[in-house]
Every structure is written in C-alpha cells, then in structure tokens.
Amino acid sequence: MNLASPEFWISLVTLTFLEIVLGIDNIIFISIAANRLAKADQKKARNYGLLLAMIFRVLLLFGISFIIKMSEPFTHIELSWLKAGISGQGIILFLGGLFLLYKSTSEIHHKLEANPQDDVVKGKKGKEKLTSVIIQICIINIVFSFDSILTAIGLTQDVVVMMLSVILSIGIMMAFAGAVGKFVNEHPSIQMLGLSFLIMIGFMLIAEGAHQCEVEIFGSHVGSIPKGFLYFAIAFSLFTEFLNIKMRKNERPVQLHGADEQAEKEGLYKDDNLGYD
C-alpha cells in the first residue's frame, strides 16, 4: 500500500463510489423493513442493518481465497434438458434472489392489503418485531455483501483498498440513511418503486446464480444481466418519479368552467349561488 500513489486513491474513490451505488438497494430494503417498526426503533434497525453489512463485508474480505474457491463447482447435473455445475457462489446468489423476490412481493401485499395499524408494534411484541426485522436484514445483507465483494474483487486485488472503501461507503450511507428512510416513508410511490427495484434485483441475482453455475436449459446457456443496464433503469425511474413528485406539489386542482351550471340545468343538483330559479 502506497498512500502517495495516485493509483491507490483512484482505486479507493472508484470502489467507494461503486460500493455506495451497490448499497442503494440495501438502504431501500432496510428503510422499508424498518418502516414497519415503531418510530423509536426505526433508527436503531437502520444503524444495526448497515453495521451488519459492514461486518459481513469485512469478514468476507478476510476470506477472499475461500470466496474464490466457492466459484468452483462441487457437483454437476447432466440431464437431457439441463446441465449445470453447482457452486457455492451460485447457490448463495440464487437463494438470495429467491428470498428477495419473496420478501418484496410480501411487502407489496402488506402495503396494499394489510391494516396500517399493524405496522406500529409496542411492548414485548415490539422487541420481537425488531428482532425479526434485524434477522431479515442480516439475511439480505449476506447476499448483498457477497455480491458487492465479488464486484470489488473484479476491480482490485488490494485488500486494504477494498476494506477502506467498505468502511467509507457504509459510513456515508449511515449518515444519509435517516434522510433516505424519511423520504421513502413519506412517499408511498417511492416505496412501491423501491420494492419493484428489489424484484428486479432478485431476478438479476437468480440469473447471476444460474450463470455462475453455468446452467444450460435445452442447450441455451443462462447469461448474466449487465448491472449497468439495471442501475440505469433504476436511476431513470427514480429521476422520473422525482419529477412527478415535484409536479404534484406544484399543480393546482383542475376546475371545469361551467360544470356547476350544466349540472344545474340537467337537474343533478341546485346551487343557490348560481342565481337560477
């Protein structure tokens, strides 16, 4: 490690920025999951979730050699219509994608169908609720951390750079997690958009897991989804929604001129202020 080297700082800034971008989906999940807690526990859940993300990623950095070995298949499937080399990396990504799909769809169902009063839980049940949310955050953090470290390994082999970038990115996300969580909670459309993003990311992880396992179905190899396309779609959707939010704040209710007079003439109602007999 050479602190005076421009390559060191370029790698650190680039990887830190990438970690923040890859951590956006993590913040969205944590904010939505914490939203179901009492307000007193929401900040605690967000901080615990991000601290766990940092711990998981640092631990994974110490086991880089083990992670690389997990890419090697430990068993093979040879069928007439299906071929695959099952690896540890592929299984983690595949199961993580399934969990993300399940959790996102269940949260959408909860937002649309459940009683809003059920979100605020107090007393003994509140402690159980906080524990449940933290466990869910732990599970998804393992998946996101694993995917993040795999991306970092592809950019640099310097463990110190990767570790510093993880710590810096988590620190920045913790500083803004409260504001992001408040914004998400105050705008239901952003919550639904975020859950839709998580469904997309879940499909991406499933495809990536199948790609890691070199799955072939009826002779067609399952490819990975380029993350650049995915995150561009997310950024474009968020930008469009921000414009919609701003437009809704500035718009005035539409008034149809002559609507009252027309209703009066048709006998739908009588308004004494119109001056008609």
Image (cartoon, helix red, strand yellow):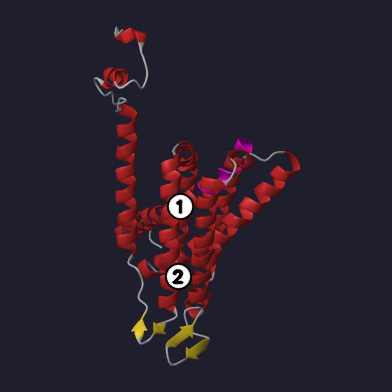
163 lies left or right of 266: right
Q: Which residue is at 37% across, 78% downward?
A: 222
Quadrant assignment for the C terminus: top left
Residue 243 screen position, x and y as percent: 29, 38
Q: Is there a contact, CB below 8 Å, between mark 2 and mark 1?
A: no
x then y, percent, for residue 238: 34, 46
> Is 140 or 188 nearer to us in this picture?
188
Q: Residues within 10 Å of mark 1 (few under 14, many from 20)?
A: many
| Mark 2, secondary structure of its residue | helix
Instruction: Looking at the picture, tell me which residue is in the foreground, 84 or 101.
Output: 101
Q: Nearer the viewer, residue 255 or 205?
A: 255
Residue occupying image coordinates x 30% and y 55% = 232
Position of residue 118 measured from the top left corner of the image (x, y, whole percent):
63, 42
Q: What residue do we see at 51% from left, 46% from top?
A: 112
The disc at residue 118 is none
Which residue is tagged 2? 206
The residue that label 1 is drawn on is: 195
At label 2, which amino acid type do we have? Ile
Which span of residues is magenta-colored?
A: 32-40
